[in-house]
């Protein structure tokens, strides 16, 4: 595999919210992985001059609903994952493959839901649309599941299980078993929080349900699309240590109000970002960039911290091996710049004002998957340039 040298980096976000910025102005990549963060090398198979750009880990959309390859039945749209790549997304985590046409969710059969998770996991492991890593096979939890169901999806490589179509009032012992089995098998537990979804049959879950269930990740705490009352959001922030997911499809004014509170409490390490799409909200290729900008503009949040929420925090929440610029890790990167006419002197300043950034290049596993410019963002004022390609 080709080696890649990137130099001339204006700002490098590490993905690690405890130390979000690196002083390094260059990166050396070999065999698809970061080999040197800050390097004296001057040669590689591909040499890129970032020309002062912002370089960040590839964005991880923590909440998507894949179905078949690059097609989504919920909006009868094709190429959605390829389009999300051009919005900076190099990895996405399924929140359940619930848009399969005709899926019987009103009277759910546990075998069918296990099979759906196994099937989608197997398919997306073999087929990566446009190179994007799709962490599919999130098993939606329904009554009557056995430990063997959890073992099967864990063995297949799934990362998550999710409560959504589950009557929380009934059978609390079963719910506790589900959470325990998932933990024992290394699966993360996510919950659809807030009000009823488009399906009409998801179950509302506010602070009382969440704090009793003790999931790892509170899915779309700002609503997907309907959030729980703000006082419930505050309770979850104060009384738990769960990851808190903010999504594009939710209530934006509450997101900003809530994020201000999260920042005041010093809990930014718990925040992850997603789109909760494709859905009734649509297909939104710039959803991650827009959500990152929304959060970056909140008082108390630095723009580089917002980038970490869309990268390293999401990786930690789901146990992924990407999301950081670290030696030895997969070289998934986005090279971005300020857009002409936008406020701010640097890309990070512009992001902090709540602006979209323009993408010039994207790498997945050290391979250039977007090399001229993004087809979904305005061009950056100063884009990265390939200086040499051997
Ligand atoms: Zn969702």
Image (cartoon, helix red, strand yellow):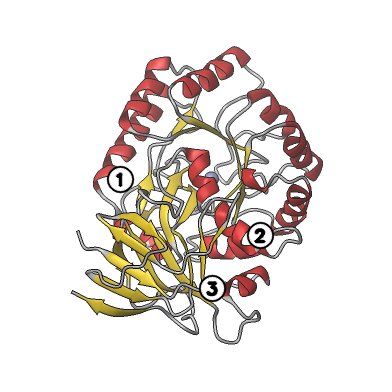
Q: Which residue was labeled with disc 3? A: 357
Residue 23: x %, y % from top left? 52, 64
Considering every residue shown, the one lying at the far front of the view is 40
For the N terminus, give its image quadrant: bottom left
| Front position among marks 2 and 1 | 2
Tell me if residue 77 can be seen. Answer: no
Above or below residue 322? Residue 10 is below
Q: Disc 2 beta carbon < 8 A from ligand 1?
A: no
Disc 3 versus disc 1: distance between alpha carbons?
29 Å
Tell which of 51 and 188 is nearer to you: 51
Disc 2 versus disc 1: distance between alpha carbons?
30 Å
For the C terminus, give its image quadrant: bottom left
Q: Earlier in the sequence, mark 3 or mark 2?
A: 2
As drawn, the label of residue 124 is: 1
Tell me if residue 8 can be seen. Answer: yes
Q: Earlier in the sequence, mark 3 or mark 1?
A: 1
As drawn, the label of residue 295 is: 2
Residue 293: x %, y % from top left? 62, 65
Q: Which residue appears at 67% of the width and 30% of the height?
A: 210
Q: Which residue appears at 67% of the width and 20% of the height?
A: 169
Residue 255: x %, y % from top left? 70, 54
Residue 48: x %, y % from top left? 34, 74
Residue 200 location, quadrant: top right
Whether residue 278 sits left or right of residue 367 in the image: it is right
Which element is circle 1 on?
A: helix
Whether residue 388 sits left or right of residue 313 in the image: it is left
Above or below residue 194? Residue 368 is below
Which element is circle 2 on?
A: helix
Q: Which residue appears at 40% of the width and 40% of the height?
A: 102
Residues tagged 3 and 2 counted as in contact (Cβ below 8 A): no
């Amino acid at each position: 595999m080709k080696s890649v040298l990137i130099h001339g980096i204006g700002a490098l976000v590490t993905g690690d919210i405890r130390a979000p910025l690196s002083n390094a102005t260059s990166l050396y990549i070999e065999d698809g992985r970061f080999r040197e963060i800050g390097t004296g090398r001057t040669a590689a198979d591909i040499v890129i001059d970032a020309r002062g750009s912002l370089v960040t880990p590839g964005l991880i959309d923590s909440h998507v609903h894949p179905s078949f390859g690059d097609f989504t039945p919920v909006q009868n749209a094709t190429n959605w994952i390829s389009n999300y790549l051009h919005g900076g997304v190099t990895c996405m985590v399924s929140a359940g493959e619930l848009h399969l046409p005709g899926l019987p969710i009103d009277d759910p059969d546990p075998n069918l839901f296990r099979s759906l998770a196994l099937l989608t996991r197997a398919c997306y492991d073999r087929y990566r649309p446009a190179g994007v890593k799709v962490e599919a096979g999130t098993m939606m939890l329904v009554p009557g599941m056995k430990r063997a169901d959890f073992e099967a999806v864990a063995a297949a490589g799934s990362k998550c299980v999710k409560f959504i179509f589950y009557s929380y009032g009934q059978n609390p012992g079963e719910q506790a078993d589900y959470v325990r089995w998932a933990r024992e098998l290394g699966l993360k537990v996510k919950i659809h929080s807030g009000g009823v979804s488009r399906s009409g049959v998801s179950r509302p879950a506010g602070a009382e349900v969440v704090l009793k269930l003790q999931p790892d990740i509170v899915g779309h705490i700002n609503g997907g699309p309907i959030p729980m009352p703000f006082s419930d959001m505050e309770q979850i922030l104060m009384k738990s240590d769960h990851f808190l997911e903010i999504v594009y499809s939710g209530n934006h004014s509450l997101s900003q109000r809530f994020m201000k509170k999260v920042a005041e409490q010093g809990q930014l390490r718990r925040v992850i970002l997603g789109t909760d799409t494709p859905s009734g909200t649509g297909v939104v290729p710039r959803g991650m960039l827009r959500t990152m900008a929304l959060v970056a503009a909140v008082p108390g949040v630095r723009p580089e911290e917002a980038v970490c929420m869309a990268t390293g925090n999401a990786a930690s929440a789901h146990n992924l091996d990407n999301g950081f610029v670290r030696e030895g890790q997969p070289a998934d990167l986005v090279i971005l710049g300020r857009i002409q006419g936008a406020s701010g002197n640097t890309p990070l300043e512009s992001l902090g004002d709540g602006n979209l950034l323009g993408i010039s290049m994207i790498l997945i596993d050290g391979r250039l998957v977007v090399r001229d410019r993004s087809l979904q963002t305005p061009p950056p004022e100063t884009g990265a340039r390939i200086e040499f390609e051997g």
